[in-house]
Amino acid sequence: MPAKLIGGVLIFILAAGAVLPVLAGDHDVRQAFKQLQGAIKARDPDKIWALIDDDTQSDANRAAKAVQAAFSKADDKGKAEFAKKYGLSAKELADMTGKLFIKSNRFHGKYYEIPGSKLDSVKVKGDTARLTYIEEDGDKEKLTLVKQKGEWRFIVPMPKAVD
């Protein structure tokens, strides 16, 4: 009888060992989502920047260049409208960077519901993860993450830069 018990415990330990790496990745993704929620709630572009992947950063830089170019062509009234629409100063719009685009109302208008959302599920497969979250209004949304430099980073589609 003790041999069966030892065999059962050994099988349980081996099975648990096979599951633990997946759970560890799952935990890291959940922690990254909490960090993203806090960074968006605080409207902290530096923290958000650190949580997004290289391609998303490049997309934000491209969006910033488009805003900067459109702003530079606007007359004084148009520049005032830009400042109001983007929630940035004229100087920030003239010196627009990817981080400043992430600070803008344009970015936060798309992702403002993330801070109050509830994480629904996480699926990790190698260096990619997919999480599903439920917004406060009940909408179910998804985000993809990739592992870069040993950290989980979000792939965040940028909103349209300029109308």
Image: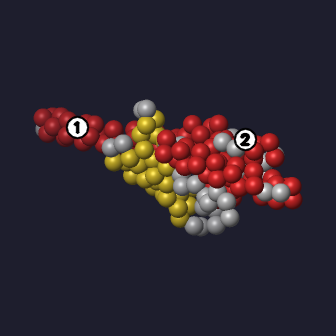
Report the front residue among 64 and 40: 64
Report the front residue among 163 and 37: 163
Determine the secondary structure under disc 1: helix
Residue 132: % across, % down: 48, 57
The 10 Å Cα crowd at callout 1, few under 14, some 14 to 19, many 20 or more, is: few
> Of callouts 2 and 1, which one flags the residue occurring earlier in the amino acid sequence?
1
In this figure, which residue is indicated by the disc labeled 1? 14
Tell me if residue 124 can be seen.
yes
Q: Which mark is residue 56?
A: none
Tell us which disc is closer to us: 2 or 1.
2
Circles 2 and 1, Cβ within 8 Å, touching? The answer is no
Q: Residue at x 69, y 41 (%)?
A: 44
Where 70 falls versus 150 (above or below)? below
Which quarter of the rendering shows the N terminus?
top left
Determine the secondary structure under disc 2: loop
The 10 Å Cα crowd at callout 2, few under 14, some 14 to 19, many 20 or more, is: some
In this figure, which residue is indicated by the disc labeled 2? 95
Q: Is residue 65 left or right of residue 59?
A: right
Tell me where residue 81 sits by quadrant.
bottom right
Residue 21: % across, % down: 33, 38
Q: Residue at x 46, y 40 (%)?
A: 152
Where 132 falls versus 33 (above or below)? below
Q: Is residue 75 left or right of residue 105?
A: right
Which quarter of the rendering shows the C terminus?
bottom right
Tell me where residue 161 sits by quadrant.
bottom right
Task: Give the amino acid type for the residue marked by disc 1 in the picture.
Answer: Leu
Q: Residue at x 22, y 37 (%)?
A: 14
Q: Is residue 62 left or right of residue 3?
A: right
